[in-house]
Structure formats: structure tokens, C-alpha cells
Amino acid sequence: MNLRRFSLIAVPYFWLLGLFLVPFLIVFKISLSDIALSIPPYTPTLELSEGWAGFRDFLSQLDFENFEFLATDDLYWKSYLSSVQIAFISTFICLAIGFPIAYGMANAPKEWQPTLMLLVILPFWTSFLIRVYSLIGILSQEGMLNQFLMWIGLINEPLTILNTNIAVYIGIVYTYVPFMILPIYATLTKLDGSLLEAAEDLGCSRTEAFWRITIPLSKAGIIAGCFLVFIPALGEFVIPSLLGGSETLMIGKVLYEEFFANRDWPVAGAVAVILLLILIIPIVLYQRNEQRQLEAET
Amino acid sequence: MSETVFEPWNDPAEKPLIQFRNVTKSFGDFTAIDDLSIDIYEKEFFALLGPSGCGKTTMMRMLAGFEKVTSGTIMLDGQDISPIPPNKRSVNMMFQSYALFPHLTVYDNIAFGLKRDKLPKDQIDARVKEMLRLVQIEKFGQRKPEQISGGQRQRVALARALAKAPKLLLLDEPLSALDKKLRQDTQFELMDIQEKTGTTFVVVTHDQEEAMTVASRVAVMDHGKLKQVDTPDRIYEAPNSTYVADFIGDVNIIEGHATKQGETMAIGWAEGQPPIIGTPSKPMDDGKVSFAIRPEKVAISAERPTDRNNVVQGKVLDIAYLGNLSTYHVQLPNGVMIKAQAANSRRRASRPFTWDDEVWLSWTDTAGIILEN
């Protein structure tokens, strides 16, 4: 019995251990190494044949130089800050667009809901890369958007959208809005309609009932959706490099350049470790807060 | 001297609190409420009773304001309430699912309606505490709904609905989620609370026992129409149709042809059997009738009783032992089944009658009721 339970729990833990923790430790080790003209392009590497002394020697060569370097060059912290800003604003826009869509879906006639759900996930049937490339076609100077706006007479000159931060926002919001819609939709469909009637019965207007009942009860979905958008948006690399311009600073792009253009794996490793910390700290804080609330209740 | 009986419906000077005037409600082609008129008086405990789909819930939802009437008017305290939205009505509802807000504590659930009225804090606090005391859940104020039992949730729902001191409280199947023992105790508490607060209660239920226990008057509904509106004892003892007789409790229904015999009527019901003698409750012409008699009014004996007009002989086919009572299913020679009930007033190992015993069934002239077809 206990063995069965243990093995059931062990599967996801081994999965995380093998596919998250071990790779992370490797990246962390690389971030503590120095760049070298070799394969792999860093030093030191662990030689197991030299035994315990070799291991001590290996440890003594590791240091935090790369992290210090990140602090000295303002490119890095500016990129982090700009990434956080872009991810934050994109998450907010996704919420502003995604919540009404999810709400509309959850309140649509039952027989329509599978179709609406299908429409939300339909974009995933096309490769992400192709969708971003086609956005270039839409957003460029001669693109469909400018042509359409000029045709209806809203503008006389084509707008410069492509290669600006606006294009990055459009790209991120377009790509990630389904991740906002789906968890919110899932919580809203579970919402018991009689709760809203009860709120109305007790003196709430429809709008008040929405803010006092619907929003608090869909909190879990909203938070899940925000994490699902914020986390990948923060490290996003493809969208800023294809749609963004020279002014677009995002840490994903910096990471890519350190890794592939400069072939500086140790600095790239340090960038990745800091990025992970930026993501993990708010999640841990949030979960501790939830835990404390749960404990306070019991 | 007896106290004055609470019977506002018999007092023409009394003004009804709720009046349904020719109310019809349709959903598409389906008519849920069909040209229905009824008066409900202040301080009444009124039960709407019927099978599912009879329209009783629709009536309640129209009172709460969640459904609009298709035609006709509903008056509350002399005022047409159809233009008033649910949040502005002095009507509160206790939902069948209780609909407690899961993210709020018991205290905040009860305070919810009071806060919407923007009452001062200390008044809200006093009122919530009063409600918690009324339904005896003072200890659980700081718990969330999921942390209390079903019975306690039912109390919270009641307290929340009563907190705003509504003119009218609607209860949708209030006790259906509780187990039988708890339900019986809660019925009496519900009556107590209704009396203490003086609120008019309208309860919707499909459980006839519940309706009979709690209500001052019961309305039996079927297919969007009222079949009978009366006190529980009159509904039981003097049903006006076979539908009501059959819906409330257990009944034997015998079809026959009635002919007047002075005060009583003789009902010919089977070849070679003496007619049943019954007393009609109102003047009636000769013709086809149904004779309805409750099983507990049919006496069962081994010897032929001599003091009664209505005596038939039959064979015990089935015995349902209920503990306090036993119901005997007796088959008459012509195949008709009659149920007779006898109280098991004495403890003993052997039953007085057993399967295949020849027994005599008998009843008095006034035990049954004659219903026109």
C-alpha cells in the first residue's frame, strides 16, 4: 500500500529531478565557470579519474565572477527590468482581453461551448514560428493592417508598428492570450449560478454581484492564467527578435546572443540563473502566502 | 376558552400579503404556471407541494424576482412587484443548494445582505450575532462553509436569508439535503423560528410529510395549476380530488356508482358485493364516483364485525412491517386490493395475521370520502 503510494508520488518527483533539477544544476555549474576556447567552451570540467583531490581542485576553480560581471554592465539589469515591464504589461493586457472572452464562453449556451473552446485552441494547430512570421506580414509598413487602416481612411500615412515595442506587445498578447482564457474559463464554468442569484437576492446589483462573487471565486483561474502568461513572456526570445526593433531590450534576446553569438556559456548561464530567480521568488512568496491563509483557516 | 385560531384565510377583513392574480408563466411552448390565483397571508407558513415539474419552483422564483410573469400580476403588500428587480424586493430566499458564498466566513455570509444596505458596523454585528444565536451556530461564525456540516450549512443559509428581516422568506426544498432524523428535528426548529420572527414563510417541497408538518396551509400543485389549497388536516382528511388523495399519504381508491340513500350514499362497486355506504361531504348527485379511504381507517379482524355497515372479506397477500405500524395488503375475491393499517401497540413475537389468512375488513360510514369523477 505504502509502496504504491510512494511510487505514485515518485513519478512526478523523478520527472522534475531528471528534467529540471539536474539540468538546472548543470547550468548553475556552468555559470560559476570561466569561458575557455575548448569543447565544451568553459573550464573547469570535472575529471572523475583524479579522485577526491581532483574534485577539490574543481570546486576551488568555481567562482561568482560572472554574476559580478552582470552587475557591472547595465545592459543586463536594463534588459531584466525591460523584460519584467513588457511581461507585466502583456500579462495585464491578456487579462483584460482574456477575462471577458472566458466570461462570455462560460455564459454561452452549453451547445456552443465546445466550439468556442476549439476556436481558442485552434491557433495552436499552426506552428508558433509561422504565426509570428505572419504577424510580420500584417504589421509591416505595407502590411495588411496599414492597408486596411488607410483604406477605411483612418490614417493617411502607414504607421510604423513592426520593429517597435508595440509589435512585441501585439505578438506576446496574441500568442499567450489562450493561456489566460483557458484557466479562467475552467474556474468560471464551475461557478454555481445560484451564488449570483443569492447575491442579487441579498441586495447586490448585477455589477456588484460580479465584483463580490464572480471575481473572488475565479481568483484561482486568474492567478494561474497570469503565471502562465507572465513566465514564458518574461523569457520570450522569438517574438522580440522577430517583431521587436533595436530599442527592444529583452533578457531572452540577450541570453541568446551571449550563448550563440558570443559563445560565452558561463555568462549566459549566469543570466539564466538570475532569470529563474526572478521567476521563482514571486511564486514562492505567493505560495507561502496561500499556505499561511490556509493554516489560518483551520 | 381556547385561543383564537390562526386562520386569516377565513377572515374576509384580512388583507393578503401576497396575491397571485391570474398568473401565467410560459417557457416557450411549455406552460409552467397556468392562470393561477392565490392569496397568502401575513405570518403564514405556506407550503407549495407537488411533484417535480409541477411549477412550484417557478412560482417561488417569480416571487423572488428571478422569473418574470408572462401575464397576470403578483402583488406583495398591495404593490405590483413585477417591475422591481430581485435586489430591491423585501423578499429573501433560502436556496436548495444553500448557495453559501464559499470564499466568505459564516459570519460574513450572514452579514452580506446587511452590508449591502450600508448599515452601521455595530448594527450589522449585533444583527449577525442575533442570527447566529437564533439558529444556534454561535461557535461557527469564523468558519468557512466547507468547514461545517450539512446541517450547520442549512442553518447558515436560513440565518443569512432572515438577517435582513424580509417581509417574505422563500425556502426552496429547505431540508431535502438532510438525513431523515435531522430533517425531522429541523422541521420543528423551522416552525419555532418562523413563530419567533413572525416572518411569512413560503416553502417549496416535494416531501408531503414535510409540508404537512410545518405548514399552516398547503397548496397541492400539478401541471401549473392548484389542485387544492387547505390546512394539512383538511388536505389529508377531505381531499377534493383523487389526485390530491393519492398524492398525500396512502389511500385506497374504489371506483363505483353512487346512489342517494337519505343522508348517506350507497356505492355499488362490484358484482355480488354489498354496496359501500359512505357519507358525502357535500350534496352530490347520483353517478360515477371514486370512494377514497385511508388504510388506517380500515379495521382488520379475524371475526366478522357486527357494528359496521361496510364489511368485506379477503385474503392477506402481503404484510409491510413498519415498526410502529403494519400495512396489510388484502385481496378481495373479485381481485380488488385494499390496504389496511393496524398499529402494533403490543410487543409480541407472533403477528395477529399472516400471509394467506382469511380476514375481515371493515369501516364506518364516515371513514371514507366520496369524490365525484
Image: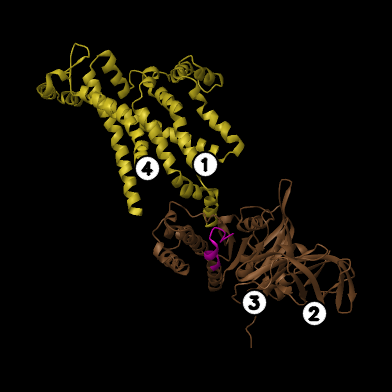
Chain colours: A yellow, B brown
Q: How many neighbours does mark 1 have within 10 angstroms: few (below 14), some (14-19), or many (20 or more)? A: some
Q: In this figure, which residue is indicated by the disc labeled 3?
A: B6
Give yes or no for residue A160 being in the magenta stretch. no
User: A298 or A188: which is nearer to us?
Assistant: A298
- Identify residue for label 4: A1
A126 sits to left or right of B205: left
Residue B233's image quarter? bottom right
Q: Nearer the viewer, mark 4 or mark 1?
A: 4
> What amino acid type should be assigned to the residue bearing mark 4?
Met
Q: Which residue is rendered at x = 42% and y = 35% of the image?
A: A225
Q: Is residue A136 above or below residue A217?
A: above
For the residues labelled 4 and 1, the Cα–Cα distance comes to: 36 Å
- Pick the quarter of the image with the C terminus of chain B: bottom right
Q: Residues in magenta?
A: B173-184
Res. B137 mark: none
* Secondary element at tag 2: loop
Give the structural element (helix, strand or loop) at label 1.
helix
Determine the residue positioned at 34% across, 28% down: A234
Q: Tags 2 and 1 in contact by the CB under 8 Å rule?
A: no
To which residue does mark 1 refer?
A189
Residue B248: image location, x then y, percent = 69, 65
Name the front one of labels 3 and 2: 2
Question: Quick check: do tags 3 and 2 share a chain?
Answer: yes
Q: CA distance from mark 4 to mark 3?
A: 64 Å
Q: The numbered mark 1 sits on a residue in which chain?
A: A
